[in-house]
Image: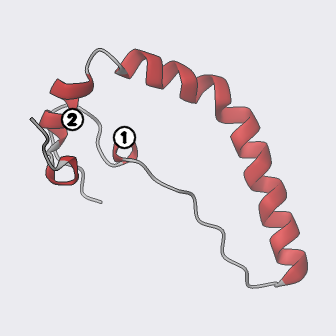
Amino acid sequence: MVTDASKWTATEWLQYFSDDLPKINNWRAAHAHPLNTFQMNLRRSATRVDSEALIDLARSAFDYSDFSGQESNL
């Protein structure tokens, strides 16, 4: 059955991805430094071109919930 995951609550995300969360968290921890370095270099390069440049990070559903079953306030 295909569902519209964009309308899931944090609890539904947790139920669906509970087996995958440790893998996702491990990947995020392993890649935090390279991604942060890339972002810092991107910000530096962008501000050289435009002093008011905005750099925004892509967000995922995992950033908007603490997976405790409570909805985030974002």
Amino acid type, label 1: Phe
Quarter holding the N terminus is: top left
Q: Position of residue 47 (x, y in %)?
A: 83, 76
Residue labelled with disc 1: 62
Q: The residue tagged with tag 1: helix, strand or loop?
A: helix
Quarter holding the C terminus is: bottom left
Q: Quadrant of residue 11?
A: top left
Relative height, residue 51 to residue 38 (above, below): below
Q: In the rendered view, how is the structure colored?
A: secondary structure
Q: The residue tagged with tag 2: helix, strand or loop?
A: helix
Residue at x 90%, y 77% (from the top left corner): 48
Relative height, residue 7 to residue 22 (above, below): below
Relative height, residue 22 to residue 52 (above, below): above
Measure the alpha-carbon separation of dots 2 and 1.
Answer: 9 Å
Labelled pair 2, 1 in contact (Cβ < 8 Å): yes
Q: Residue furthest left?
A: 1
| Mark 2 neighbour class, 10 Å CA radius: few under 14, some 14 to 19, many 20 or more | some
Q: Is residue 32 left or right of residue 43?
A: left
Amino acid type, label 2: Trp
Q: Position of residue 21 (x, y in %)?
A: 36, 22
Residue labelled with disc 2: 13
Q: Position of residue 34 (x, y in %)?
A: 75, 36
| Mark 1 neighbour class, 10 Å CA radius: few under 14, some 14 to 19, many 20 or more | some
Q: Quadrant of residue 50?
A: bottom right
Q: Is residue 42 left or right of residue 69?
A: right
Q: Position of residue 4 (x, y in %)?
A: 16, 50
Q: Is residue 74 left or right of residue 14?
A: right
Please tell me which of labels 2 and 1 falls first in the chain.
2
Residue at x 46%, y 53% (from the top left corner): 59
Residue at x 72%, y 80% (from the top left corner): 53
Residue at x 74%, y 85% (from the top left corner): 52
Query: How many numbered discs?
Result: 2
